[in-house]
Amino acid sequence: MLTIRLLQSSDIPPIAAAFAELGWNKPASQYEQYLSEQEAGQRVVLVAYSGVQNLPILDFAGYVTICWQSHYPPFREANIPEIVDFNVLPRFRRQGIGAALMDEAENRIARVSPVVGLGVGMTADYGSAQRMYARRGYLPDGRGLFSGGKPVQYGQSVPVDDDLVLFFTKLLT
């Protein structure tokens, strides 16, 4: 059984605990900020819970957020909403939860925009996401790599870390 719904304040402790258990730096304050932005209409945070049918206990499985006004200048200038910070806990991967979260995010975006954007990291840690986005029809936006929010120039050396990103778009209609 899979449940996808908007982030609520009661979700924050189990989400932060799940990522702390993995050793990932995703503190409760991050989700408190997301909730504040959701309440202000700037962001939507969709959370997924998985459980066994007919049992009342559901486990946090993952989330995705939609930023209605992207921080990436080409998306912001074109009013393209951006899918940002998409995570499915490792033990819930390859069960369709990520696809269900993306479907819901894309459906919500399609109500207000014919195009969705997202950025993906360039290290192997992002390999599953890179493949999933390609299978879902996302194409590079043609502006090349960005690092630290700035375009990478030919010959430039940049750190290969979570800030090294390639942006993609998908036509939803």
Image (cartoon, helix red, strand yellow):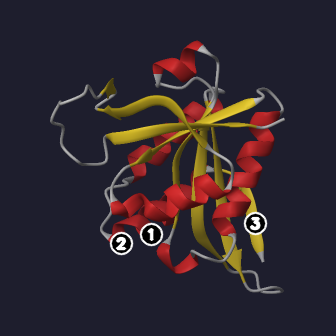
Q: Give residue 91's position: percent from left, percent from top.
A: 52, 80
* Alpha-carbon span between mark 2 and mark 1: 7 Å
Q: Residue at x 64, y 32 (%)?
A: 39
Q: Looking at the image, is mark 2 or mark 1 nearer the viewer?
A: 2
* Residue annotated with mark 1: 18
The amino acid beneath tag 1 is Ala
Location of the C terminus by quadrant is top right
Residue 46 badge: none
User: Is residue 22 or residue 144 the one in the foreground?
Assistant: 144
The answer, for residue 17, to whether it is visible in the render is: yes
The amino acid beneath tag 2 is Leu
Find the residue positioned furthest to the front. 154
Residue 3 badge: 3
* Callout 2 touching callout 3 (CB < 8 Å): no
The amino acid beneath tag 3 is Thr
Q: Give residue 68's position: percent from left, percent from top.
A: 63, 27
Quadrant of the rendered image containing residue 20: bottom left
* Alpha-carbon span between mark 3 and mark 1: 17 Å
User: Is residue 74 or residue 107 the one in the foreground?
Assistant: 74
* Residue annotated with mark 2: 22
* Callout 2 touching callout 1 (CB < 8 Å): yes
Are there few (<14), some (14-19), or many (20+) residues within 10 Å of tag 3?
some
Secondary structure at badge 2 equals helix
Q: Residue at x 60, y 35 (%)?
A: 117
Location of the N terminus by quadrant is bottom right
Q: Residue at x 76, y 51 (%)?
A: 104
Q: Give residue 12's position: percent from left, percent from top.
A: 51, 56
